[in-house]
Amino acid sequence: MITPAMAAKAYAAALTQGTEDVGPPAAQGGPNFGEVLKGVMTDTVQASRTAETKVVMGMQGKADLLDVVSALSSAQASLQTALAVRDQVIAAYQQILAMQI
């Protein structure tokens, strides 16, 4: 389930990508849908790896518990966002398949 914090994070990320002119992304030379998904997945994997590293460091006594919990929370939020996007893409695909030609 998407929380308000995850929605705010996604909104802030969208604002930082730059939206000077309104129009189709191809006309602006912006990233295409595949590139955006690849970036989201890369960020999700990186957050997961960071969390795993922090957990190992925490078990060795080299990391603060707050850092470990923060990294795990960030990884969980990233994964939930990626899964929500995946579910929406699958639902849209299924709707397209159900359309009559």
Image (tube, rainbow, N blue to C red):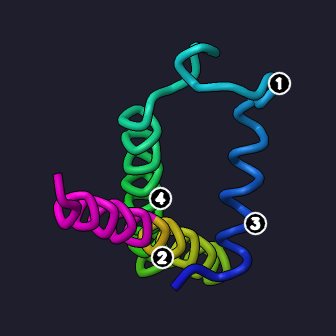
Q: Which residue is mark 2?
A: 76
- Amino acid under disc 1: Glu
Q: Which residue is mark 3?
A: 8
How many angstroms separate mark 1 from mark 2 (CA)? 32 Å
Q: Secondary structure at mark 4?
A: helix
Q: Secondary structure at mark 3?
A: helix
- State whether residue 23 is above or below residue 76: above
Numbered disc in front, either 3 or 2:
3
Numbered disc in front, either 3 or 4:
3
Q: Give coordinates of residue 31: x percent, y percent.
A: 51, 26
Q: Earlier in the sequence, mark 3 or mark 2?
A: 3
Q: Give coordinates of residue 65: x percent, y percent.
A: 61, 83
Q: Give coordinates of residue 60: x percent, y percent.
A: 42, 76
How many angstroms separate mark 4 from mark 1 (CA)? 29 Å
Q: Which residue is mark 1?
A: 20
At 40% across and 44% down in the image, what residue appears?
Answer: 37
Q: Nearer the viewer, residue 58 or 74?
A: 74
Q: Is residue 36 magenta?
A: no
Q: Earlier in the sequence, mark 3 or mark 4?
A: 3
- Amino acid under disc 2: Gln
What main secondary structure does the magenta stretch of the protein show?
helix
Numbered disc in front, either 1 or 2:
1
49 sits left or right of 95 in the view: right
Whether tag 3 and tag 4 are in contact, CB under 8 A, the answer is no
Q: Which residue is mark 4?
A: 47
* Magenta extent: 82-101
Q: Earlier in the sequence, mark 4 or mark 1?
A: 1
Q: Give coordinates of residue 15: x percent, y percent.
A: 78, 43
